[in-house]
Image (spheres, rainbow, N blue to C red):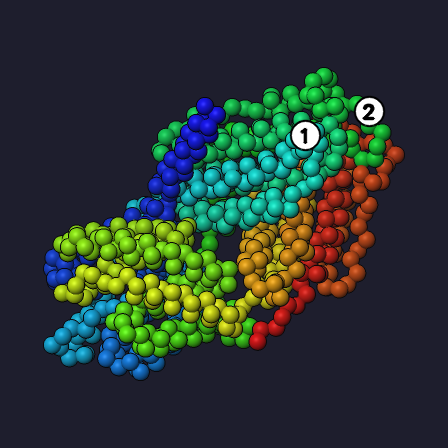
């Protein structure tokens, strides 16, 4: 029986994960792209024939990469560059099909220009892929026999352009139609990411020796996982902001936007739960209470997952249990039995007693409970969102959609990563083309180039991941494609297969590339078969695998040419992170919000908070990527991880201060806290923004190590001023530690060759 129950639980967990995947925004987006491919291919097939439909489907496939869930405004301009710039490239390849030298001289600079689009970041990557796809897939489109080169190229390009143009219109309309569903799905994904972070945080509460119940020292792997979860949530939040906060004009949109803003508050309170945790863990007898907090946090994570599932299924979530009473009933005795009087015993040591710290930690967990209750109340329609903040947030927090020339003008530095990646890609494409000409099965030369395009990434870590997935996916995809083509399906049946393969390939391109590699192999082979009508359905499995291995080998080798090691980017990321921390501290410690009559100070703080989290997320991700690089060129990883941990701790201290200023202002005396707030802001500025190498200002002694004449009062009594001053002193201390680690991390790495 003990062996059966875990398997059932595991099966239920897998089924639940599969259902969430099926209802996710990336699957919905993939299905939408596939339906567009099917409609356009079938329509062109009816009116112009099979050859025209094949060329038009290539136009759709080339145009589709930028079609991702996003805001309604700017969708047309996001979709337009791929077909507009890709069509001349498609035509040029068609014209030079019979001129190997001229074709090579076109493909190499085309690859360089296409990959320059990655200078526009996440918006530019799909455009770059689409542009180079237009050249690679044009190699697979046969020339029209019996026609002049110009006539055949013009005719094929016209059908390509027809498919691409129709798809741009379709993509804009589909994004408009799916906008409401995308809002729900992106919010649900954000809730699931928050729940995962809560579970990792809960593991931090429960680390104790199973034999004796004694607390164990912090686990570096668990800390690293916590940082990674924070970074993943920050990325997910920005994707959700761009869609959920756009034009919240209807009550339903306003509720979803209000829920997203509550997620931001929950993240802050969750981060504040790190405060005093290590101090508590060092005290004997508190493992029982921490495990009780762990149980509460896990239960709340389950509630958040249940809310996300209800949103995805279109159901009204059930009411949420208020766990405040459960938290208030926790006992914090030194013996750890969990029984007896809740009143703390007299504390003779320096600083606050462990009992007071524990009660404060339970109260911060209670803030998460309060926000979760508001979240479910909004989802059930039982509460109204803060419309002033929602409407202002849509103007302030949605990413711009207009294209700018600034990234292009900033490219032309020898150490600029996009420029080096473009040169690297051009070299790889040129090498792949030369190798393809020398192979005895040169009729499928485009497969090597396609493999290079999808495997070669901007960093070595991403290239290695794509390399392995591409080889495994090609093997599985060849077997599937062989089975499909051996059934001798009709043209419409093959279009249906293309539709399904396109849905899977597009939907999982970012989430799990192995699945995309399988679907893309089926898509490419079936598409090639349709383009080369009359050719036998059989193909050599060895040739496809050999092409894939050659392409991945070239991409892997070229990833070491003109490398942009993460160590070269770390100093700029560290500088951005430190500056963002300093600005957030300055805004968070201001009293403007308590004295203002509008929401301007709060919005300024929210903007500063977003940049603090986003910059820290970028630094965490760069550090993780650097672990796949050669040891000789890695940045000081240990120092970077300490820097990241201290930055999150600084954010947590400032969050606790902000919570006191906003939620418990009645227990603070403005006249007594104005000077400490201003002094702390100045000291944090001096610590973080001083020139590298300059002497850091002296930090205050730790309150725990410097007993004052009077012990800190109960934080739940009327006077919170001593606790706020303690938080400020700890924040200043952490700022000095951030500065020390930043000085080490900002040391210049190896210069670009």
Q: Which residue lies under the disc numbered 2?
A: 346
The percent coordinates of residue 686 (x first, y second) are 74, 56
Quarter occupied by the C terminus: bottom right
Viewer can see residue 346:
yes
Q: Which mark is residue 195?
A: none
- Relative to 516, residue 531 above or below: below
Hey, which quadrant is residue 12 in on the image? top left
The residue positioned 37% from the left and 30% from the top of the image is 315
Front disc: 2 or 1 = 1
Q: Is residue 499 left or right of residue 201?
A: left
- Residue farthest to the top? 340
Residue nearest the viewer, comparing 163 with 102: 102
Rendered view: 185 above or below 579: above
State the separation of the CA atoms marked 2 and 1.
29 Å
> How many numbered discs, if any?
2
Residue bearing mark 1: 211
Where is residue 632? Give x, y as percent: 62, 66
Outermost residue on the right side: it is 709
Query: In this rendering, does residue 81 appear at all?
Result: no
**SS at circle 1:** loop
Indicate whether 429 appears above or below 548. Answer: below
Q: Quadrant of residue 286?
A: top right
Instruction: Judge left or right: residue 166 versus residue 581.
Output: left
- Pinpoint residue 392: horizontal percent, then vertical percent: 49, 46
Q: Residue at the spot x=23%, y=66% of the render?
A: 161
Q: Nearer the viewer, residue 749 or 581?
A: 749
């Amino acid at each position: 029986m003990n062996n059966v129950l875990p398997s059932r639980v595991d099966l239920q967990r897998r089924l639940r994960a599969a259902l969430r995947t099926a209802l996710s925004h990336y699957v919905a987006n993939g299905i939408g792209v596939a339906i567009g491919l099917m409609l356009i291919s079938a329509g062109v097939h009816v009116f112009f024939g099979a050859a025209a439909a094949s060329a038009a489907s290539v136009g759709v496939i080339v145009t589709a990469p930028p079609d991702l869930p996003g805001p309604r405004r700017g969708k047309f301009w996001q979709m337009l560059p791929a077909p507009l710039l890709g069509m001349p490239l498609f035509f040029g390849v068609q014209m030079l099909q019979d001129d190997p030298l001229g074709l090579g001289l076109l493909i190499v600079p085309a690859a360089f220009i296409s990959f320059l689009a990655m200078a526009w970041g996440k918006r530019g990557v799909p455009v770059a892929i689409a542009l180079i796809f237009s050249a690679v897939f044009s190699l697979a489109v046969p020339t029209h026999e019996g026609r002049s080169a110009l006539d055949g190229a013009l005719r094929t390009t016209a059908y390509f352009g027809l498919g691409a143009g129709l798809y741009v219109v379709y993509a804009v309309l589909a994004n408009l139609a799916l906008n409401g569903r995308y809002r729900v799905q992106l919010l649900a994904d954000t809730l699931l990411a928050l729940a995962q972070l809560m579970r990792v945080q809960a593991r931090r509460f429960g680390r104790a020796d199973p034999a004796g119940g004694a607390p164990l020292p912090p686990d570096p792997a668990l800390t690293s996982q916590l940082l990674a979860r924070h970074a993943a949530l920050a990325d997910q939040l920005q994707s959700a902001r761009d869609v959920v906060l756009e034009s919240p004009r209807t009550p339903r949109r306003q509720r979803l936007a209000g829920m997203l803003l509550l997620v931001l508050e929950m993240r802050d309170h969750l981060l504040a739960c790190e405060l005093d945790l290590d101090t508590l863990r060092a005290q004997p007898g508190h493992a029982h209470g921490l495990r009780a907090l762990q149980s509460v946090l896990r239960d709340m994570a389950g509630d958040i997952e249940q809310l996300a599932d209800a949103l995805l299924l279109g159901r009204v979530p059930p009411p949420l249990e208020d766990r405040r009473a459960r938290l208030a009933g926790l006992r914090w005795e030194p013996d750890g039995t969990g029984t007896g009087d809740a009143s703390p015993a007299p504390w003779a040591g320096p600083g606050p007693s462990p009992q007071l710290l524990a009660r404060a930690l339970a109260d911060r967990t209670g803030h998460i409970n309060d926000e979760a209750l508001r979240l479910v109340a909004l989802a059930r329609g039982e509460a109204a969102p803060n419309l002033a903040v929602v409407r202002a947030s849509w103007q302030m927090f949605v990413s711009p959609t207009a294209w700018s020339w600034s990234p292009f003008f900033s490219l032309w530095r020898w150490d600029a990563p996009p420029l080096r990646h473009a040169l690297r890609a051009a070299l790889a494409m040129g090498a792949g083309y030369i190798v393809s000409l020398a192979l005895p099965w040169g009729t499928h030369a485009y497969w090597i180039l396609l493999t290079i395009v999808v495997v070669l990434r901007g960093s070595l870590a991403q290239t290695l991941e794509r390399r392995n997935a591409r080889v495994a996916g090609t093997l599985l995809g060849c077997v599937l494609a062989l089975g499909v083509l051996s059934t001798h399906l009709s043209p419409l049946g093959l279009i249906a297969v293309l539709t399904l393969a396109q849905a899977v390939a597009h939907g999982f391109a970012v989430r799990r590339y192995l699945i995309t590699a399988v679907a893309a192999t089926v898509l490419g082979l079936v598409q090639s078969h349709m383009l080369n009508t009359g050719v036998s359905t059989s193909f050599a499995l060895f040739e496809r695998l050999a092409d894939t291995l050659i392409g991945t080998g070239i991409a892997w080798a070229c990833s070491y040419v003109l490398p942009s090691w993460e160590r070269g980017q770390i100093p700029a990321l560290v500088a951005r992170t430190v500056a963002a921390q300093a600005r957030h501290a300055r805004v968070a410690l201001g009293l403007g919000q308590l004295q203002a009559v509008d929401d301007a100070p709060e919005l300024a703080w929210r903007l500063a908070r977003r940049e603090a989290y986003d910059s820290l997320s970028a630094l965490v991700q760069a550090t993780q990527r650097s672990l796949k690089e050669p040891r000789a060129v890695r940045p000081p990883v240990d120092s970077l991880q300490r820097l990241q941990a201290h930055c999150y701790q600084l954010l947590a201290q400032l969050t606790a201060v902000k919570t006191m200023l906003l939620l418990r202002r009645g227990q603070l005396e403005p006249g007594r806290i104005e000077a400490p707030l201003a002094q702390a802001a100045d000291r944090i500025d001096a610590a973080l923004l001083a020139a590298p190498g300059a002497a850091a200002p002296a930090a205050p002694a730790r309150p725990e190590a410097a007993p004052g004449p009077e012990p800190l009062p109960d934080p739940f009594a009327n006077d919170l001023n001593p606790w706020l001053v303690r938080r400020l002193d700890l924040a200043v201390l952490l700022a000095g530690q951030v500065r020390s680690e930043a000085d080490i991390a900002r040391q210049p790495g190896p210069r670009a060759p």
